[in-house]
Amino acid sequence: MDDTIAALSSGPLPAGIAVLRLSGGRVRAALEQLAGGVPEARRATLRTFRDVAGEPIDRGLLLFFPGPTSVTGEDLAEFHLHGGRAVVAAMLSALTALPDIRLAEAGEFTRRAFANGRIDLTEAEGLADLLAAETETQRRRAFRQSAGEFRDLAEGWARRLLRARALIEAEFDFSDEGDVGESAARGVRSEVEALRVDIERRLRGARRGEIGREGFRVAIAGAPNAGKSSLLNALSAREAAIVSPEAGTTRDLVEVRLDLGGAVVILTDTAGLRETDGLVERIGIERARAAIGEADLVLSLAEPGHAFEALDTQAPVWPLRTKADLALPHGEPALSTATGLGLDTLLERISNAAREAAGDPAEVVPTRERHRLVLAETAAILAAYDPEHQPPEVAAETLRLAADRLGSLTGRTGVEDLLGVIFSEFCVGK
Ligand SMILES: Nc1nc2c(c(=O)[nH]1)N(C=O)[C@@H](CNc1ccc(C(=O)N[C@@H](CCC(=O)O)C(=O)O)cc1)CN2
Ligand SMILES: Nc1nc2c(ncn2[C@@H]2O[C@H](COP(=O)(O)OP(=O)(O)OP(=O)(O)O)[C@@H](O)[C@H]2O)c(=O)[nH]1
Ligand SMILES: [Mg+2]
C-alpha cells in the first residue's frame, strides 16, 4: 500500500494511444523527474516524457489528479502515449526505476479505491461487470451497479438495522421505566420484520440478476442424430460443432454465446442420449445430463418417427420436431436446418424467454451468488429475532450478527478473505 504503482490501463499494443497510470505517494516526485513538473490538476497538458538520464521517450498528454478525490483516493497521473510496444516499455521502466515505484497487480488501482473508501465492494463488482459486459443489458445493469445503486440499497438497510439496535440499547437503559422500553421494543420488532421482508423481496430477483450477468443457459438435448449440432450451428450462424450422419458424433459440450436483443444466451450442444459401451461417449452423456440439469431452458429435439427423450431438469422443456423437410410433423413446432423452417421463430422465442428471465435491467437486484448468500443469511438471522422469547442480550446480539453479515455486502465487515477473489477479476491497470 506504501508503494506507488504503475501500469498500462488501455488495451493491447500496438494501439493509437496508450494510457499509463501511476498512483500513490511518489506521483509528484515522478512527474518532477520525468515530465518536467506537476501540471495543473485535471487539465490535459502536452509534455515531453524523459527517462532518468534525460533522454526523451515520447511526447504526449499528461493528466494529474490530486488525492484524496482521485479515483484511487491517492495522487494519480495518466500518461497518454503513442501506443507502441517500445514506447510503453520504456516509459514503464523509467517509472519503475524510481524509488518505491513498481508495476501494479491485477485490479490494484480499484483495490486502492476500495481501501480508501472511494467505492464499496458492490461498486467494484459493478466495475468488473462493466468491463466484462458484452451486451446492452449487461452494460446497463453493470453501469447502474458501478454507480452505486446497490450500495445505496445496502447502506439503507444497514442504517435501519443500526437504528433498531440503537433503540434496543436504549431499552436496556430505560428498562426500569417500563413504558419507554415496551413501546421501543414493539417499534423495533416491526422494523426488523419489515427489513426482513424487504431483503427477501430483493432476494427473489437474485436469479434474474445472475442470469442477466452470466447469461441465460439453453441446452440442446435429444437422441443421437436428432439434429442437435445442426441446430446449434444454424442458430449461431457458424460451424461451431461437427455434424455427421454417424450417431454419437458429439461427445463433449459445445458452447456458443449469442447476443439476442441485448440478452446473453449461452447455447450448449450436448452428446446424444443413449445406452452405450463407449467410455468417451458415456462421459459425454454424463456431461450432457449435467448441462441439461443446470440449464434455464432445454430444447428437446427428436427427428421424425422418434420419441422425445425423458429429461431430468427443473427448467422448462420445449419439444421440437427436427428434419421437417423429410416428414411434415403434426403437433410439435417443426424445424428444418436444411430449409430454415422454424429457425427465426425459435430464435425469437428464446430471445423473449432470455429477456424475461433476466428481468428489467433497471431493477436493483443481487447479481452474484455472493450477494444472494449474504442476503439469505441476513434474512435468516433476522427471522430468528424473537425478543418476546429471548433475553434482551440475545435479541441485541441477533441484530449485531445481522448487521455484521449485511456489512460484508458493501465490505464494511468481515471481508478480508474475499478481497483477493473480487479484485483478481480485473485486468492489470484497473
Ligand atoms: N482517462 C481516463 N478515462 C476514464 C477514467 C480514467 O480514470 N481515466 N475512468 C476511470 O475509471 C472513468 C471515468 N471516471 C472518473 C471519475 C472521476 C474522475 C475525477 O477526476 N474526479 C475528480 C474530479 C471531479 C470533477 O472535476 O468533477 C474528483 O472527484 O475530484 C476521473 C475519472 C472512465 N474514463
Ligand atoms: N434432411 C435433414 N437432415 C438433417 C437436418 N438436420 C440435421 N440433419 C442431418 O442429420 C444428421 C445428424 O445431424 P447432427 O446435427 O450431427 O445430429 P446430432 O443430434 O448432433 O447427433 P449426435 O451428435 O450424434 O448426437 C446429419 O447427417 C445432418 O446433416 C434437417 O433439418 N434436415
Ligand atoms: Mg451432435
Image (spheres, helix red, strand yellow):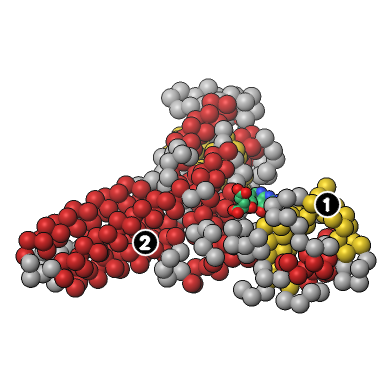
> Which label is found at residue 406?
2
Question: Which image quarter holds the C terminus?
Answer: bottom right
Badge 1: few (under 14), some or many (20 or more) residues near its Cα, within 10 Å? some
Query: Label 1: which residue?
Result: 46
Residue 376 is tagged as none
Whether residue 277 is visible here, answered yes or no, is no
**Whole-percent x, y for residue 326 in the image:** 59, 25
Q: Earlier in the sequence, mark 2 or mark 1?
A: 1
What's under tag 2, amino acid-wise?
Leu
Observer-side mark, 2 or 1, equals 1
Residue located at (42% from left, 70% from top): 414
Alpha carbon separation for disc pair 2 and 1: 47 Å
Q: Tell me where residue 383 appears, x and y as whole percent.
A: 23, 59
In the image, residue 117 sits, relative to residue 220, either above or below, namely: below
In the image, 254 versus 331, the foreground residue is 254
Residue visible at 42% across and 57% down in the picture: 371
Q: Looking at the picture, does residue 327 appear above or below residue 101?
A: above
Quick one: SS at disc 1?
strand
Element under label 2? Answer: helix
User: Could one spot residue 65 in this view of the protein?
Assistant: yes
Q: Amino acid at mark 1?
A: Leu
Residue sitting at 67 percent across and 35 percent down? 237
Tell me residue 57's x, y (percent).
89, 61
Quadrant observed for ligand 2 in the rendered image: top right
Direction from residue 79 to residue 337 in the image, left or right = left
Q: Residue at x 67, y 43 (%)?
A: 240
Q: Quadrant of the N terminus?
A: bottom right
Q: Is residue 410 left or right of residue 390?
A: right
